[in-house]
Each structure stands twice: as C-alpha cells, then as structure tokens.
Amino acid sequence: MPKRALVVGLGIAGMSAAIGLRQAGWQPVIVERAPERRRGGYFVGLMPEGRQAAADLGIRDHLHTRNPPGGGKAWSLTRRGNLEPGLGFLHQPGNPAAVVRGDIEAALWEGIHGDGTSEPIAVRFATKPVEIDDTGTGARVLLEDTGTGAWHRESFDLVVGADGMRSSVRRMVFGPHEDHMTGWNAIICAFQLKEQVPSFKEADSIISARAGRGAWVFGFADRPPTALLTYRTEDVEGEFAGSTIERLRAAFSDMDDPVVRHALNSLEETPDFLFDSVHQVKMPRWSRGKVVLVGDAAWCLNLYSGMGATFALRGGAELGRELRERPGDLDAALTAWESRLRPSVVRHQHLARVKKQLFVPSNRPAEAVRSVVVRLACALRERQLAKPRAAEERAA
C-alpha cells in the first residue's frame, strides 16, 4: 500500500508538495478550508529555479507566461512628477517569467489531475485540520467539514502544512505565531487593475517610490496590470481598524501622482485584493516527527523578496526528490530536503531587507540613494542592450 500524506492548503506550495509526493510513490490528499479554488491574483516574477521546479513537477507546458518583449518598458515617477526610465522587476538578472499567482495555480491544478500516466490527487474543499496527534508511527488528524460542522479522524504517514504565513498546522504542532513570525513594520496591498494608468502603454510598468511609501504597477503582455501599494508604519495593528481604502488614502495622502490616484480609485471597485502586514517566518527546523511545513508556513520570504512562488515550487519538487531517493527513511529524507533548501532560503530572507528599500525607502536619504542606484542600473542595462544591436548593425 502506498504511504498516505495529508497536504493542508491548495496554494502553490501545497499543490507542488502533493505532486512531488505523488512522484515519490505516495498517495497525497489535499484539504482546503475555502469552498472553491482561488483564481487571479497579483504579479509574480518566476525566477529560473522556479521554472526548473515547474519542469520537474511536470507542469511547465501548462504554465502560461505573460512577458512583454524585452521585459517591457519601466518608468519611475520622480518626486517632482517627472518621468524617468525605470528598472522593472522583469529587468533583473535571470529573466523572470511574468505571471499572476493564478497562472501558477492553474498549471498545478492541471498537474494534480494527472496526465493519464498518474492518478489524480484527491482534493477536499471546505475542510480543515482541527487537531494533529503524532503517534510516532504516523499522524492521527481530526478534520472538520466547515460546511456541515462534521468532524472525523483519519490516519496519515505524513502531514504537510502548506497553509500560508499564519499556518494552522504550524500553530498546532510548533507553537504560536509570535514564536516564528518576525515583524517588518510595513503593510502591502496587492490587486488587479481593470485598466492601465492613463497615458501609459498596456505593458508598461510604473514605479512611484517615496520615503515610507511605494506604488508599483506591473505590466503584462496580454492582460491588464496588477498594482502594489506598500507603506511603512509603527502601528501595524492599528492599520487593520476601519476602512482599508481610507487607511491607504491616509498613508498616500501627499503622493498625488497619476499612479497613486489611479491605483486608489481602482481599488474602490476591486472586490478581491490582498491587504496584510509584512512578515517573515523563521524556524530552527521545518519538520517535527510526522509533520513538515513548506512554503510560507515554513520560511515566508515575504513579497519584497520576489522569491515566494519560486521557493514554493522548488520546495515541493525537492521534497519529492528526497523522498524518492530515501523511500524507507522519512527522517533522513526530510533532513536532506531541509539541508538542500535552507541556505538559499536564509540568503533570500537577508536579501529581502535590501529589496525592501527598493520597494519602499525608509527615509529621504534612502530614497535619494535608491534613485541613484536605479539610474545607474538603467544606464548599465541600456549599454548591455546596445551591444547586440551594434553587432547586428555591423553584420548588416
């Protein structure tokens, strides 16, 4: 009989882990507390490691990418309201693939249904774990049907917590959130725009970054842009009192530029958006007994890192690989899996602190330094792009 695994969470990390488990010969079951699958979502730049993980999981052909030619044009709005060439997310080394979160989840959804050579993975919506009892030889899990309120117990050989930054699995097995979540004194709001900022081309990306606040618009080749509003605050809890749109209007009250105006006006008509505080998750170990955490539940890199989806995919692919290589020794497989991933995770958690200054400078001097760095990077990129153009002209 194949070993059974309970995967908690139908996001990128959860579906990736489930496919990796199936590749290792396990029988995964996914439970999701929501009544149906999410769609859409905010901008994601998928890095080479993430694209390789997608290939390893067998979903690369299902993944629709939306890169404008050459990464598209990016513009920076200065404090004086002038437009300058900017450095967009897609212009960084590695040529990130432009997608929205829902594109990756749609590809993974195709993957968990199998390709005719593998069994579909069972998914139970409106279901959540209430209690996890590690018996030493397995895990007894009390599950609740959130629609009917009915409870029942099932046994599994492994429980995978892939239920996000505020993971219920982590809380039940590893302790309260405050033991593992670090505060960053910042708020993010990400959402889909119905249309591009007026006077800009559809695939343009636009950045307006000031001391303590940042507004980003991410352009795509074949769909309307997404927006990110982010700001620093010393009272994170207070930001969740009252109206979200009023909080954002107050935070950006002295940034009356086209990007901010368009984003705030669009948000009032947007039914689905992410508004949350920024954190990282740091843990001494990602597994305990028959329970392992993956994705944001284990190592949340946060949105500033730009690596969350990449590592969610990679975590699942690597988990499957280690289980295949050590089929009879779960502890050894989980130890090897963590040893392989942790150095990169820690490095990108540190880099996220630097990237935060690009998204939302901490003060006016940091804003000025950011502007200089972006101008230099744009000039360097332009010189690099000019070399092949010059070579083509000489050849002609």
Image (cartoon, rainbow, N blue to C red):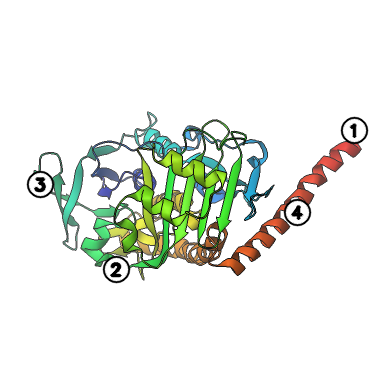
Q: Residue furthest top?
A: 116
- Residue type beneath disc 1: Ala
Cα separation, mark 4 vs mark 2, equals 43 Å
Q: Which quarter of the figure is the N terminus placed in?
A: top left
**Mark 3 or 1: the one toward you:** 1
The answer to whether the residues at label 4 and label 2 have Cβ atoms under 8 Å apart is: no
Sequence-wise first label, 4 or 2: 2
Q: Is residue 311 above or below residue 101?
A: below
Q: Is residue 11 above or below residue 281?
A: above
Cα separation, mark 3 vs mark 1, equals 73 Å
Is residue 229 at all visible to an observer of this figure? yes
The answer to whether the residues at label 2 and label 3 have Cβ atoms under 8 Å apart is: no
Cα separation, mark 2 vs mark 3, equals 30 Å
Residue 224's tag is none
Q: Disc 3 on helix, strand or loop? A: strand
Q: Which residue is mark 1?
A: 396
Sequence-wise first label, 4 or 3: 3
Q: Which residue is mark 2?
A: 178
Q: Is residue 178 above or below residue 79?
A: below
Occupied quadrant, residue 36 = top left
Q: Which residue is mark 3?
A: 152
Sequence-wise first label, 3 or 1: 3
Give how far across and how far down residue 9 sits, in percent.
Answer: 29, 47
Q: Which residue is mark 4?
A: 379
Sequence-wise first label, 2 or 1: 2
Q: Which quarter of the figure is the C terminus placed in?
A: top right
The answer to whether the residues at label 4 and label 3 have Cβ atoms under 8 Å apart is: no
- Residue type beneath disc 2: Glu
